[in-house]
Image (tube, grey):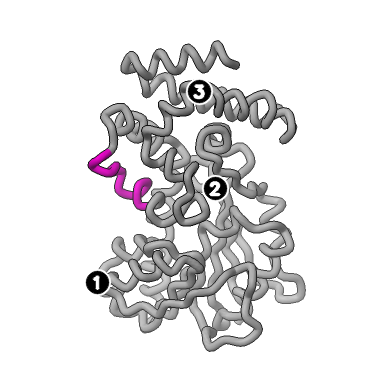
């Protein structure tokens, strides 16, 4: 492993960062898929963290923000903005910007950008079928999908609830032109009673990657209970064989709870008989479960 990292490091320094990082990411994910958690940590992750290439890759603001976790968790709204807009901080080093360009152009980042566009498209379609629309985003981030909506769609959204546990993220959401109701709440400590019900569309496209099975099942049932008859709930989760898994775990300390389509299907609440649809994004890094409330 050490000799492979040596070669990748020299290639990056020599300007071959696209080829080096792409090949290294492919290799790391192959290793991750074939090793137990213990062997992966001891034979790969430890070597990656101790090798000089680790410090080189930390020049990338996307990689370093995930590893340092200034908000206490990786994948915060600032990181998502990096993925959406593909613009590194001005103070980044030249090699850091070069690494950033490669990482942010990877299939995983493409999945994140597609996810944003997909949500906007679903809202557009639902708004075309209703005079008024009530929507909630769970673990909402900066709600960048709203920026993609047509003006007439925005006008039909009569209530938009931005649900997140991060106060700094919600403070940023206030700057959106759409009238937004902020709800600071932790999905791992759901309230027994609240005033937020009667939604036509609820989506949660990031938080399931951080929940255990019991938490995910409880959240799904709770969100389904908040839908209007005929309302829709969309949840998403990265898959175990997502392209960037090895790099994320080794160099970003970004460890997700990954799920197959069968595991996602197990979250469908029993007894409610919702219509369900399971599908992948075009890059097959993320699996989606769309549930429709009866009625």
Residue 190 falls within the magenta-colored stretch: no
Closer to the N terminus: mark 1 or mark 3? 3
Foreground mark, 3 or 2, reads 3
Query: Closest to the observer: 182 or 105?
Result: 182
- Quick one: 8 or 159, which is closer to the camera? 8
Position of residue 126 relative to residue 19, above or below, is: below
Marks 1 and 3, how far apart at CA: 43 Å
| Cα gap from disc 3 to disc 2, whole angstroms | 21 Å
Q: Is residue 294 left or right of residue 120?
A: right
Residue 158 visible to the viewer: yes
Point out the stretch of residues depicted in magenta: 81-91
Residue 104 bears which disc, if any? none
Gap between marks 2 and 1 measured at Cα: 29 Å
User: Going from the N terminus, do you reach mark 2 or mark 1 first?
Assistant: 1
Q: Are marks 2 and 1 in contact (CB under 8 Å)?
A: no
Q: Is residue 184 depicted above or below 18 in this figure? A: below
Dot 3 or dot 2, earlier in sequence: 3
- For label 1, the residue is 151
Reading the image, the residue beneath label 3 is 24
**Circle 3 — which element?**
helix
Using residue 293 as the reference point, say whether residue 170 is left or right of it: left
The image quadrant where one finds the N terminus is: top right
Residue shown at 36% from the left, 61% from the top: 145
- Counting from the top left corner in percent of width and height, residue 228 is at 55, 82
Q: Which residue is mark 2?
A: 286
Mark 1 residue element: helix
**Contact flag, marks 3 and 2 (Cβ < 8 Å):** no
Vertical side of 57 occupied by 203: above or below: below
């Amino acid at each position: 492993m050490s000799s492979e990292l040596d070669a990748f490091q020299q290639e990056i320094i020599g300007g071959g960062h696209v080829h080096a990082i792409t090949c290294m990411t492919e290799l790391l994910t192959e290793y991750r898929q074939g090793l137990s958690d213990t062997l992966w940590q001891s034979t790969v992750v430890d070597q990656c963290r101790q090798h000089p290439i680790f410090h080189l890759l930390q020049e990338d603001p996307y990689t370093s923000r995930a590893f340092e976790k200034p908000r206490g968790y990786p994948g915060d709204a600032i990181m998502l903005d990096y993925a959406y807009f593909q613009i590194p901080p001005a103070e980044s080093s030249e090699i850091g910007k070069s690494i950033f360009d490669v990482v942010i152009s990877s299939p995983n980042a493409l999945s994140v950008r597609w996810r944003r566009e997909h949500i906007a498209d679903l809202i557009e379609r639902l708004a075309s079928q209703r005079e008024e629309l009530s929507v909630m985003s769970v673990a909402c981030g900066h709600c960048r999908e709203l920026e993609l909506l047509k003006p007439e769609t925005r006008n039909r959204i009569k209530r938009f609830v931005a649900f997140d546990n991060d106060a700094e993220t919600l403070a940023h959401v206030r700057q959106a032109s759409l009238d937004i109701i902020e709800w600071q709440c932790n999905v791992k400590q759901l309230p027994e009673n609240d005033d937020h019900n009667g939604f036509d569309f609820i989506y949660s496209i990031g938080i399931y990657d951080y929940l255990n099975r019991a938490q995910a099942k409880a959240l799904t049932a709770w969100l389904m209970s908040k839908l209007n008859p005929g309302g829709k709930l969309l949840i998403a989760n990265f898959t175990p064989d997502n392209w960037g898994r090895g790099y994320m775990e080794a160099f970003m300390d970004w460890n997700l709870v990954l799920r197959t389509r069968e595991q996602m299907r197990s979250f469908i609440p029993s007894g409610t008989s919702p219509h369900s649809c399971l599908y992948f994004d075009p890059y097959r890094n993320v699996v989606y479960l769309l549930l429709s409330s009866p009625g």
